[in-house]
Every structure is written in structure tokens, then in C-alpha cells.
Image (spheres, rainbow, N blue to C red):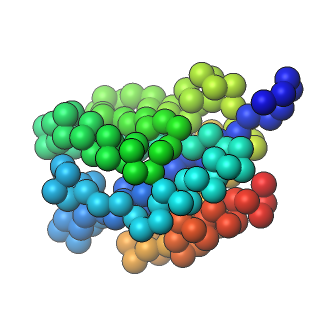
Amino acid sequence: MGVGEIKRAVFLDRDGVLNPVVMRDGSPASPRGLGEFSLTPGAGEQVARLREAGYLVIVVTNQPDVARGLLPEEDLAAMHRVLDQAVEPDEIRFCPHDDHHECACRKPKPGMLTQAAAEHGLDLAASWLVGDGYKDMQAARAAGVRAVLISADYNAQVEAPQRVADLAQAVDLILEQG
Ligand SMILES: [Mg+2]
């Protein structure tokens, strides 16, 4: 990468983007271990397209089940090893906190994005986020990155700047708009 070249990222939410959500009591939720964890078909291929286009691909995921005692950190780590090996993002960042911690990283706060930007020297205005929930869209707006929502039954009411049907279409849109 040349001096002065723009460094940009695509931030990917995890649940509902790279792996299917688990429905609990009618609401989308996070898998609580490898037994509930599977990858979105084609996820690795789509991440490869982004990386070939010069984007850093950074997973940013809220995992409050860690704080709630419902997900041991080693089980989260086991899922992330699978994700890392099969999908090959540049980084996986997660927030293990719950609302009452008032941390800076839990989406809709932009902390995971701004921290990554500081560490990698990213141009956030040239970056993107792909997610499936309102917290993703709000974190993107707060960080000043463009956002795409992957439509699902559970997010019809979410306000989003752009909507697509799946991850492949999100990547198409990002590569078109640059
Ligand atoms: Mg999600």
C-alpha cells in the first residue's frame, strides 16, 4: 500500500450476517456455542471479494451473553476460531458487556469501529458496515461509515440507508459504490 493511500474497511456484524441468528422466544439471538453455530453459505467467498478489493474486513459483534453468564468466553472463542478459519476476516472484535456496563464498545455505540480506525489508520468515511439490526445502523452513523442492512423478517421496522437481500448483494453494492 502506497504512502497516502486511503485505508478503508468493511465492518461486518456477525449474527445474521456471517452466521444465522438463533430465534429465542421469537427474537433473533446469538448462538451459545458450536452446537448452535453455523456459517452463512458463501460467507468466505464474500469476505474474499472484499479483501481482494482492498478492504480490511473487521467483524464487530455484541456478545452480551458473556456478561450475562450464558456464554463462556471459551465457547465464544471456539466459534470465533471456526469463523476465522472458514471465513478469514482480518479481525474479529467483540463486546462482551451488557447495557449496565456503559462501555464504549457495545453497539449502537461506535467504539469497536473507532478503536479499529485508530489502530489501523482507517478512513471511516470511505468504510462500510453491513448489519442486520438497528444497533448496527446507529453505530455506523455514529462512526461516520456508510451502512447496508441485510433484510430479514425481524428487521422490517429498522431504518436503514440501504437494504439488500443477502451478504452477496451487500458486497455487490459496496463494490459498485466504492
Ligand atoms: Mg446481527
- Left or right: 142 as drawn, with respect to 92: right
The location of residue 14, given as percent across then percent down, is: 41, 52
| 14 up-or-down from 90: above or below | below
Q: Could you say which is closer to the camera, residue 71 or residue 87? A: 87
Q: What residue appears at the point 56 percent right and 60 percent down from the top-left corner?
A: 46
Q: Could you say which is closer to the camera, residue 3 or residue 133? A: 3
The location of residue 77, given as percent across then percent down, is: 27, 36
> From this viewpoint, is residue 99 visible?
no
The location of residue 98, given as percent across then percent down, is: 29, 37
How many tags in the picture?
Answer: 0
> From this viewpoint, is residue 156 visible?
yes
Where does the C terminus fall, quadrant-wise? bottom right
Q: What residue appears at the point 16 percent right and 56 percent down from the top-left corner?
A: 35
Q: What residue appears at the point 47 percent right and 45 percent down from the top-left corner?
A: 88
The location of residue 78, given as percent across then percent down, is: 24, 40
Q: What residue appears at the point 57 percent right and 29 percent down from the top-left corner?
A: 116
Q: Could you say which is closer to the camera, residue 17 or residue 79? A: 79
Where does the N terminus fall, quadrant-wise? top right
Residue 170: name its quadrant.
bottom right
- Left or right: 173 as drawn, with respect to 37: right
